[in-house]
Image (tube, helix red, strand yellow):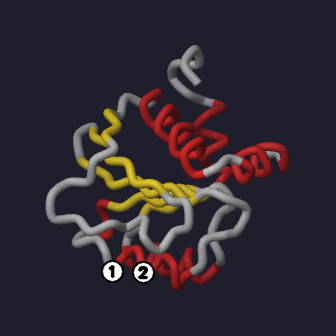
Amino acid sequence: MSPDSRERFAQLDGEAFARLVARTWRAYGRAIESDLPDGVGDPSAPIDGGRVLTARAADRRIVLTHPGGEQLAATALLAVLAEVESPEELRVVSAAGFEPGALSVGDAYGVDLVGPGALARLRDHQPDRAAP
């Protein structure tokens, strides 16, 4: 990933970053909804500017976006996990990536963490390059 991609993602506000993530997931055939499923708390509460999307394909995933230039900390990820019943249904997409402690928490709880490098690769290799 080029430093330009990371800086570009980090400069987006919460709404713009959520739209970019939604467009990326749609290019891979995911239906995106902005409403949370019943029985799910608000996992975006601990994330300043975070947005929640629901991605559907064969399975449902709650997609939490983390905008800005700061890496997501373990304490914030633990606060997010307190809001969801099934951590394995959660995917967190961070514009700046994750602190090492957050990577450990994600691994321990089976949370799919998507940093700026993975997001840039997904956008660069989309099945349908006409969309985003």
Secondary structure of residue under mark 1: loop
- Amino acid residing under circle 2: Ala
Quadrant location of residue 62? bottom left
Q: Quick check: 11 above or below 105?
A: above
Q: Residue at x 26, y 68 (%)?
A: 41
Local secondary structure at mark 2: helix
Considering every residue shown, the one lying at the far right of the view is 3
Please tell me which residue is depicted at 51% across the width and 35% down the height of the picture.
24
Q: Residue furthest top?
A: 130
Is the residue marked by circle 2 packed among few (<14), some (14-19), or many (20+) residues within 10 Å?
A: some
Image coords of residue 31 (percent x, y): 32, 33
The span from disc 2 to disc 1 (Cα, nearest Å) is 5 Å
Is 131 on the left-hand or right-hand side of 71? left
Residue carrying label 1: 82
The quarter in which the C terminus is drawn is: top right
Residue picked out by circle 2: 79
Residue displayed at 48% across by 80% down = 105
Q: Quadrant of residue 48?
A: bottom right
Could you tell me which residue is drawn at 58 percent across and 14 percent down? 130
Q: Is residue 71 above or below residue 17?
A: below
* Residues under numbered marks 2 and 1 in contact, where contact means CB atoms less than 8 Å apart: yes
Question: In the figure, is residue 62 to the left or right of 38?
Answer: right
In percent of width and height, residue 68 lies at 68, 59
Q: Residues within 10 Å of mark 1 (few under 14, many from 20)?
A: some
Q: Is residue 106 above or below residue 60?
A: below
